[in-house]
Each structure stands twice: as C-alpha cells, then as structure tokens.
Amino acid sequence: MTSLLSHFKALYPVMKRLIDISVSAVALVILSPILLILCLLVRVTSKGPAMFWSERTGHLGEPFMMPKLRTMTQCSKVMSRESADAGDISVTRLGNILRKSSLDELPQLWCVLKGEMSLIGPRPLLVNDRLAEQRRARPEIFNVKPGITGLAQVNGRNFISMRNKVRYDAFYAERVCLFLDAKILYRTVGTVLNVKLVQ
C-alpha cells in the first residue's frame, strides 16, 4: 500500500500538468465570449489597454509575464493587489468589481496552458513585492509552479499576514497532492460564489 501511494505521488506532477492543460484549454474556449465582453468594457470605461501584463517570479525563480484584465487607471504605478485594495483611488469602478469577483484573473488561464502557471499553487509575486524577500527564505516554494489560486487565497487572501502567507505557500509546496489540490479548488469555488452573493 505504501509503495502504491509513493508511486502515485511520483506520478502526480504529470497528472497535474495534464489536468492544467485540459481544464485551461476548455475554460478558454468556453469563457472566450465573456473575456471579449470584459475586455470591451475595460476599454470603454477607462483609457488604456484592456489587458495589463506584469513581470512575475515563477517556477524555480524564473520570471515570466502574467496577464490580467486591467483594473487600475492607465497612469497607475505597478503595485500588489494588497496595496491597491487599501482604498486606492487608482482602481477603477469596473476594476473594483473585477477584483472582488476575481474575473480579472481569467487571462491567466493562458499562462496555465503554456505551462508557466498551474491552476493551483502559490500566487506569483511581482518582482518588487514586499513578500518576495520572505519567500526567498523558503526556496521550496519555487519548486512548484505558481497558481491562479492557492492555499493562502482560501485561508484569508489579503487579510492574513505576509508571514502566514509564506507559511501556507511553503506548506503547499511540501505537501502538494491530488487531495490538497481538490480541497483548494473546492474552497476557491465556495469563496468566489460567496463574494458574488454578498455583493
């Protein structure tokens, strides 16, 4: 039994990648009309491009460019979500809705399909994020691909300390498995639906 579990654990990274490819590909096809409408709304309601690309730290510390629907004014400086969510006036009215519903994250499905990200994993940080320095003290975090959602996101997201975020990220990186991913995905759906019901 122990040998079987070890074999399954060794194969899980391959399974995880296959799940990422299939889910992201199907989701991009199904959600493409919604993404198109959202892009048009972003363009119509504020000046600037519909998509915003920022450099993030990815798997094994390698940088990559991550897309999001633009939620801030064109002249805003690049900053973490936590900084902008603290009553920052540079977040547009539509951007505030996109952030609360997490719809601004949908373009990242493209990064999942390309293999730069996974559906589930530690959130990719801006290169200059305050949390980056604390993450460097736990290099095991970079052994897994960053994700659209993760353990820290379903355990408080922006309302937990940076120290606890790092702890959640390290815990996930050390214990990633099908059961943990399924649990995070389940709680993510619940969190998103709860936000929509509250609004």
Image (tube, grey):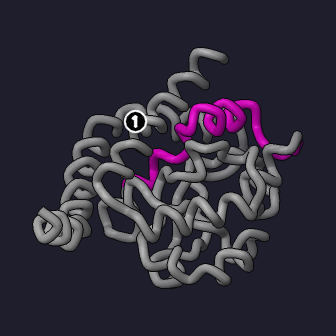
**Magenta residue check for 188:** no
Please indicate whether residue 174 sits to the left or right of residue 112 in the image: right
Q: Nearer the viewer, residue 20 or 160?
A: 160
Residue in the picture at 88% in, 40% down: 87
Tell me the quadrant of the picture where the N terminus can be found.
bottom left
SS at mark 1 in the image: helix
Badge 1 crowding class, 10 Å Cα cut-off, few under 14, some 14 to 19, many 20 or more, is few
Q: Specify start and end residues of the magenta stretch as a single range.
A: 88-109
**Magenta residue check for 103:** yes
- Amino acid type shown at disc 1: Tyr
Q: Nearer the viewer, residue 99 or 198?
A: 198
Tell me the quadrant of the picture where the C terminus can be found.
top right
The image shows a total of numbered marks equal to 1
Please indicate whether residue 125 sits to the left or right of residue 61 in the image: right
Q: Nearer the viewer, residue 138 or 191?
A: 138
Q: Is residue 3 above or below residue 26?
A: below
**Percent coordinates x, y for residue 163 in the rendering:** 74, 64
Residue in the picture at 81% in, 56% down: 76
Residue in the picture at 31% in, 45% down: 28
Residue beneath label 1, please? 186
**Percent coordinates x, y for residue 8 in the rendering:** 16, 65
**Percent coordinates x, y for residue 86 in the rendering:** 86, 44
Residue in the picture at 45% in, 77% down: 59
Please indicate whether residue 190 sits to the left or right of residue 4 in the image: right
Q: Is residue 61 above or below residue 95?
A: below
**Percent coordinates x, y for residue 140 in the rendering:** 51, 79
